[in-house]
Amino acid sequence: QLQLVESGGGSVQAGGSLKLTCVGTGSIFRRCELNWYRQAPGQKRDVVAFITTSGATSYHAAVKGRFTISRDDAQNTLYLQMNNLKIDVAGVYYCRCDGYYETGERFQFWGQGTQVTVSS
């Protein structure tokens, strides 16, 4: 089992920065391929950034060059540095872990989300 807890959200003016943190409790964190998702009101969750177990990353086109995803497996922590924030990236941000147990069984866990508000 794995519990994911996000923090770091808040209210910021456009052009500002925030750093989100997702802490996992459980030894399987290092097996996770990790995502940050965003959900705006009335919309489905969309992936914003992704990082593999080996540290390879990918980003949604709307945030590429402004957001940076990183992980520290020694601290069971996932980060999302968000710079030059724009109003259209506001929403609830969730971290998600996908991986496989040693048995080959797949697992997936979500955090509870953290709110990001961007004002003009």
Image (tube, grey):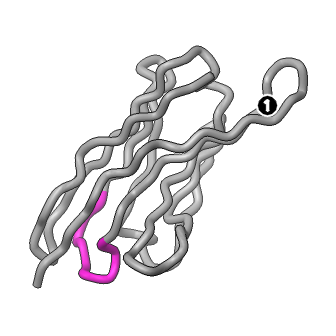
11 displayed left or right of 53? left
Residue 104 position, x and y percent, is: 89, 27
- Residue 89 falls inside the magenta stretch: yes
Q: Amino acid at mark 1?
A: Tyr
**54 to 66, vertically: above or below:** above
- Foreground residue among 59 and 9: 9
Q: Residue at x 38, y 50 (%)?
A: 113
Residue 41 position, x and y percent, is: 38, 77
Image quarter of the N terminus: top right
Q: Residue at x 17, y 57 (%)?
A: 10
- Foreground residue among 53 and 7: 7
* Residue 101 picture quarter: top right
**21 to 1, vertically: above or below:** below
**101 to 89, vertically: above or below:** above
Q: Residue at x 54, y 44 (%)?
A: 110
Residue under numbered circle 1:
100
Residue 78 position, x and y percent, is: 44, 38
Q: Which residues are magenta?
A: 82-90
